[in-house]
Image (spheres, rainbow, N blue to C red):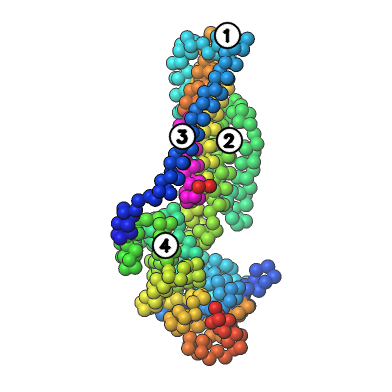
Amino acid sequence: MTVLEVRGVRKRFGDHDVLQGVDLELDAHEVVVLIGASGSGKSTLLRTINLLERVDDGQILLGGDDITDPGVDADRVRARIGVVFQHFNLFPHLRIIDNVTLAARRVHGMPKDTAHARGLELLGSLGLGAKALDYPDRLSGGQQQRVAIVRAIMTDPELLLLDEITSALDPQLIGEVLDLVRQLKSTGSTILMATHEMSFAREVADRVVFMQGGRIVESGPPEQLFDAPVEPATAEFLARVRHH
Amino acid sequence: MSTGAAEAAWQPSELELSRRSVRRRASTRSVVIALISTVVFAGVIGLALVGSPGWAVVQQTFFNLEIGIESFPAILAGLWVNIQVLVVAAIGVAVFGTLLAVLRSLRGPVFFPLRALATGYTDLFRGMPLLIVLYLVGFGIPVLDIFPRLPAVVWGTIAIILTYSAYVAEVLRAGMEAVHPSQRMAARSLGLTHAQTLRIVVIPQGIRKVVPALMNDFVSMQKDVGLISVLGAVDAVRAAQIEVAQSFNFTPYVVAGLLFVAISWPMIRLTDWASARLAAREQSGGVV
């Protein structure tokens, strides 16, 4: 079953074409990893899917519904998608448990007790149960990002968008966040993620998509794209990344 | 934990102990110097005042203890009116000011009239002297004859709410705009509506950022409630005025002034303390 369908999406900021006709499909339980240099359009693509940016052309379908239709209720669409940002963006004035249960209670109408119990269960399974009543600034970056992921999956979204979620973390904290993504994959989440972690992309992705200059240059299974890229641009990008 | 045991075993070195004793001596010396200079300063001012040719007259007219004690109960009763006005006005300003701030931050062409109205309102009332607002509201609106007859205190309170809401709305708006856009983005991504995002995420964080400024406005309002006396409400200032008219002595004004200082002083100290705490938290340690 197709969860997400992106058809010829274009986005322009000023006179800069950030997305120049992107086509992409995601099936249920599929993990697709976007790679590419900064400014290649990965984040913008994720933001248009979540309706944080309006597309200038093309169509995006979520579960078969055209979410780029002007008549669509953007809040309802966003409630169906879970997003995790590079800089966590937890709400600093709310305790961890309130951060995690906010959408469940206020958007999905889950009773407070149920939301609380489910939030504690999820936090507990990640070893963060003891932090439930703390405020975000008491947690390490890795812990904050894992809380942000719990916040995003609390309401069982149809699709998870992860936007360079390890880019702001120290190397020793990256591992704990990636472990959680592995866990999500094993439970069947549908994930579209942008990342600079190539070895992780190779391990976890069902499909890797290489973007450059607002276009998808090449996509395929990780072994093929990493070991035998067809396009010269892909090979060049991979060579540059590997030398770091 | 093992680090805890290590901490317990740690004893400051000779070097650290000598540094501490130097710092202690320096701070003792500072305190002594501050004390001496304060006493000298106060002494000089006091002598200059008491030694001035007109001091006897000033003392008799402004600092007459007997008249002060005599007028105290009436002024205190008036002050109770001021405190009631203050409490009601503070609540009114909180509600109306927040509403104005939200209206000014609405986006989209649909809300243009509301946004323009709120902007015009804050421009007008921040520019207009409170005294004139008091006259217009207190003497103008009753003449319209559409409201039942209300005491002057009520009109005075309304005038204060109208003026101070404009200031508070601007402070709140600044606070809301200081909340990082990524917070809005995170909230909207969860499916929260614009209104929910404002209420649950933006306003609580925005208010935190402007607490010192809001407290400053409150202190300012605390003394401006004394201006309702111009409408004839018998508050502390008006009560003092009546006493002055009876005794031909200005001491009751001094009494009223000191009473206003007394009620605002706790809030002033609290404001300082809150600002200092905020600064300390944002700098997270350090000696500069």
Q: Where residue A16 sits in the image (x, y, percent)?
A: 67, 71
Magenta span: B265-286
Residue designated by label 3: B28
Please check the rendered image and state whether residue B273 is part of the magenta-colored stretch, yes or no: yes
For marks 3 and 1, the one nearer the N-term is 3
Which residue is more in the foreground, B138 or A191? Answer: A191
Do tag 3 and tag 1 residues touch (Cβ < 8 Å)?
no
Residue B163's tag is: 2
Q: Element at badge 1?
A: helix
| Marks 4/1: CA–CA distance | 69 Å
Indicate the chain on which mark 2 is placed.
B
Neighbour tally class for label 2: few under 14, some 14-19, many 20 plus, Cα within 10 Å: many
| Marks 1/2: CA–CA distance | 42 Å
Do tag 4 and tag 1 residues touch (Cβ < 8 Å)?
no
The reply to the same-chain question for discs 3 and 1 is: yes
| Marks 2/4: CA–CA distance | 45 Å
Q: Element at badge 4?
A: loop
Residue designated by label 1: B56
Q: Residue at x 64, y 41 (%)?
A: B123
- Looking at the rendered structure, the kind of residue marked 2 is Thr
Neighbour tally class for label 4: few under 14, some 14-19, many 20 plus, Cα within 10 Å: few
Residue designated by label 4: A140
Which residue is more in the foreground, B214 or A79? Answer: B214
The reply to the same-chain question for discs 4 and 1 is: no
- Label count reads 4
